[in-house]
Amino acid sequence: VATMRSLLPVAVSAVLLVAPSKTLEPDFTKGISDVKACMASENLDSLDALRTNKEARTAEEKCFIGCIMKFVEVLNSDGQYDVALFKDHINGCPEMAKDQQKKAALLEVAESCAGKASACSGHCECGVIVANCL
């Protein structure tokens, strides 16, 4: 279970986890593209503060995390946690098919996050809550 100290790696890992391609290079390229798109849309100039602080402190950083969670469809288009959508991605991920124990554990965590993210509103708030849960 991740803590605030691992928020950025969790977000980037989530991007790479559910990228649709079956080879690592396109997954990595898509992940980098998603990160850059979220940095632009959320007016975040650098990831340095997230790396240094190990947590999202500013509104831009929180919205960046939420944006990443939307890209990987952990959050739906309204910015709310969507456990069914996230589970679909986990079940469809080629990497998870290779490790059924890891897949089962992630599905369990995905389910347990539903209650924690039910009271949040929008991707800026929900993204951080879900990232902390994951």
Image (cartoon, helix red, strand yellow):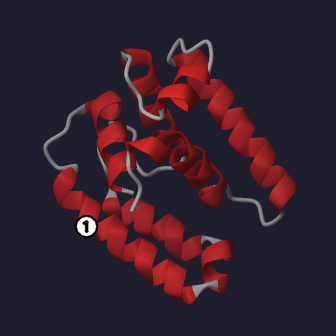
**Residue type for callout 1:** Ser
- Identify the image quadrant of the C terminus: bottom left
52 relative to 124 in the view: left or right = right
Look at 51% across and 87% down and name the residue there: 101
49 relative to 77 in the view: left or right = right
Q: Is residue 19 above or below residue 94?
A: above
Q: Nearer the viewer, residue 134 or 42?
A: 134
41 relative to 132 in the view: left or right = right
Q: Nearer the viewer, residue 67 or 45?
A: 45
Q: Is residue 97 above or below residue 17?
A: below
Look at 52% across and 38% down and name the residue there: 68
128 relative to 19 in the view: left or right = left
Extreme-bottom residue of the structure: 100
Q: Position of residue 69 (x, y in %)?
A: 46, 43
Q: Nearer the viewer, residue 53 or 126?
A: 53
Q: Is residue 119 above or below residue 82?
A: above
Q: Position of residue 130 (x, y in %)?
A: 33, 48
Q: Position of residue 72 (x, y in %)?
A: 53, 49
Q: Is residue 14 above or below residue 45?
A: below
User: How many circles with numbers are drawn on the protein?
Assistant: 1
Q: Nearer the viewer, residue 56 or 98?
A: 56
Q: Alpha-carbon neighbours of circle 1 within 10 Å: few (<14), some, or many (≥20)?
A: some
- Identify the image quadrant of the N terminus: bottom left
- Identify the residue position indicated by label 1 in the image: 112
Look at 65% across and 36% down and name the residue there: 34
Among the 4 quarters of the image, the one containing residue 104: bottom left
Q: Secondary structure at mark 1?
A: helix
Look at 19% across and 53% down and name the residue there: 116
Q: Position of residue 60 (x, y in %)?
A: 44, 17
